[in-house]
Amino acid sequence: MSHDLFAAARAAMAKCYAPYSKFPVGASLRTEDGRVYSGGNIEVASYPEGWCAETTMLGHYVMGGGGEIAEICVVAEKMDLITPCGGCRQRLAEFAAPGTKVYLCDQTGIARTITMAELLPLGFQGDTLR
Ligand code: THU
């Protein structure tokens, strides 16, 4: 069932724009109501201006209407079991619940499942800013 999420992340990875690092990454998520959003990393010649696959994915998700996130999947062509960077952990935690499943992948599929809370324990929460 979750293999389609891996396929979506792989398809997004194939569309990444990473001419500088040559390190393609893909990410995908499924909402509780079954919508799938994905993204690849996008780099810029002024290196710090590029952004991660997870961030592209979240942009699509928010513009697609947002909602509860059931599962997230991340894959990298050159790194098995890649985990989202620190900044993306914070961005993911903005929209995912502590119990949201996060799938870490090798080149054939989902290799490990963790939760959002495991990915970002003790993360900063914006509740008091609202
Ligand atoms: N990258 C991601 O897209 N997601 C991550 O979780 C880690 C890193 C990208 C950013 C950059 O385009 C390339 O990988 C090398 O850092």
Image: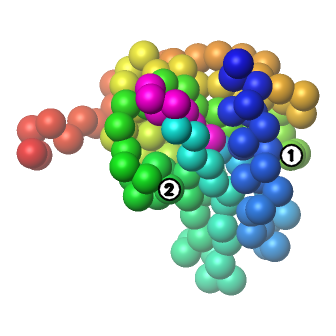
Using residue 105 as the reference point, say whether residue 70 is left or right of it: left
Are the residues flagged by discs 2 and 1 in contact, CB closer than 8 Å? no
Question: Looking at the figure, which quarter contains the C terminus?
Answer: top left
Q: What number of labels is visible?
A: 2
Q: Quadrant location of residue 113? A: top right
Q: How far from the left and from the top, in percent, is residue 106?
A: 84, 29
The magenta stretch is 28-34
Q: Quadrant location of residue 28? A: top right
Question: Looking at the figure, which quarter contains the N terminus?
Answer: top right
Q: Nearer the viewer's eye, disc 2 or disc 1?
A: 2
Residue 84 drawn in magenta: no
Using residue 105 as the reference point, say whether residue 93 is left or right of it: left
Q: Going 38% across and 21% down the picture, which residue do you hit?
A: 98
Amino acid tagged 1: Glu
Report crowding for label 2: few under 14, some 14 to 19, many 20 or more residues within 10 A (C-alpha).
some
Q: Which residue is mark 1?
A: 77
